[in-house]
Amino acid sequence: MTAGVLALQGAFAAHASVLESLGATVVEVRTADDLALVDRLVVPGGESTTMSMAAERSGLLEPLRAFVASGRPTFGTCAGAILLAAECFDGRADQHQLAAIDISVRRNAFGRQVDSFEVDVPIPALGDAGLGDAGFHAVFIRAPAIERVGDGVEVLARVDDRPAAVRSGAIMVTTFHPELAGDDRLHELFLRS
Amino acid sequence: MAQPPQESSAAPSHQTGSQLVKRGLAEMLKGGVIMDVVNAEQARIAEDAGACAVMALERVPADIRVDGGVARMSDPAMIQGIQEAVTIPVMAKARIGHFVEAQILEALGVDYVDESEVLSPADEAHHIDKWAFTVPFVCGATNLGEALRRISEGACMIRSKGEAGTGNIVEAVRHLRSILGDIRALTQADSAELFDWAKRLQAPLPLVQEIAETGELPVPLFCAGGLATPADAALAMQLGAQAVFVGSGIFKSADPAPRAKAIVEATTHYGDPHILAKVSRGLGAPMTGIGMDDLDLKLADRGW
């Protein structure tokens, strides 16, 4: 199994290290040629505006849209959730959406960096998958919020009564950073999908 | 300092200002370019080019060199103007040891404070106690010992100092090679030698032991000081920096917007010479630059 990590900008190295520790072969994806090598993809956190521009300039927008539409497993965290969403509020007018999952996301919904936080959130799907108890330590960095979920989108976790982890088909997104807190179970869930 | 938002009794409380949260933002900036800007218009040019953050300051280092005098924290009105102009993180500089400037920057809600040698030092012996803040700090370093002293004071990101405002990459290369070379050497040292390493580096032993074990700094390492071209950014990345700061190099060049965009692309594709060749074409004149022998003032010597 070859897992790609979109490496245009952001926390790609942290994701690659978690995936490698779980036994996956990891490719850093910066071009369409790189993307052709992988059968699943992580879209990491970082600055969504920067990543959107880099994807466009690197000729990756259409290959990425085709990749997520093909049903191959894709896991987006924070800025990755923004890029994969159908709709984004408080972004730049020229920001691109991959529209892989029918959700609406608001950028920087919790405030500036001084408001970034960590908190324990229950994720019952982890228990259902035989991956231990539901407790998960979630790290939110200038995090977005999911303000709308479409039909058929399953909410896996909530923070402040707002969805913080959702799944639809082969696409899973979190508004927090599972790659930072030393708990690899969401990555395990992604590799199993 | 900002209090965490109040929760209903049933909800677990949000913990703000932890090392995980502070170092976490530095993780998010990796692979990106942080650009010095002096007004809202430059901030918008930086964001349009794909900067992952901007550094708000009153004068870029090249002008601070020319003007002389005391360089201080920027006017809060100017910082707020930049915060309103862009959606990406906004950093700002405080003088070395000037913890009240840092308190003011935290109150303004800047996303990172740079305790910077580019401004005139306010304290000739002490840096800011950065553990006391919710906002994270980045500090400059010329060698591994300096980097570890800053981390022991609570810095959540280290950048090479380089020599700001010169457009000359040579000092940044020296600092990166020194920091990364000593990290590589530490991983080869035996446990008895680590005590001597700590003494020579003038750094806390537990941090020295941690690096000998992991082979990397416990916080991200970025490059700053003298970058002026896409090739400079890619050089820093190939040497082992995880992101780059570009100060005077963009807005002191002949045509800032295309140069800013090219430096962003070079930082993403730093390992691909064909892409580097493509993005380096036709950018106009870079900033003039200064040789190290012609310098009256070496900013990198500030900091202790």
Image (cartoon, coloured by chain):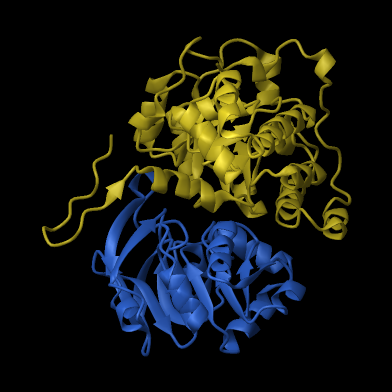
Chain colours: A blue, B yellow
Q: Please give the name of the residue rendered at 37% of the width and 90% of the height, measured from the top-left corner.
A: A152
Q: Is residue A55 above or below residue B178?
A: below
In the picture, the quarter occupied by the N terminus of chain A is bottom right
Residue A84 horizontal side relative to residue A128, left or right: right
Res. B158 image quadrant: top right
Q: Is residue A122 above or below residue A70?
A: above
Q: Among all residues in the image, which is located at the extreme left? A: B9
Residue B162 horizontal side relative to residue B83, left or right: right
Q: Position of residue B212 (x, y in %)?
A: 58, 38
- How many marks the image carries: the answer is 0
Q: Position of residue A102 (x, y in %)?
A: 44, 82
Which residue is more in the foreground, A105 or B201? B201
Residue B24 horizontal side relative to residue B120, left or right: left
Q: Is residue B259 above or below residue B138?
A: below
Which residue is more in the foreground, B66 or A18? A18
Q: Position of residue B94 (x, y in %)?
A: 48, 25
Which residue is more in the foreground, A149 or A37? A37
Q: Is residue B138 visible?
A: no
Res. A154 image quadrant: bottom left
Q: Position of residue B278 (x, y in %)?
A: 86, 57
Q: Please give the name of the residue rendered at 29% of the width and 57% of the height, measured from the top-left corner.
A: A119
Q: Is residue A33 visible?
A: yes
Which residue is more in the foreground, A99 or B10? B10
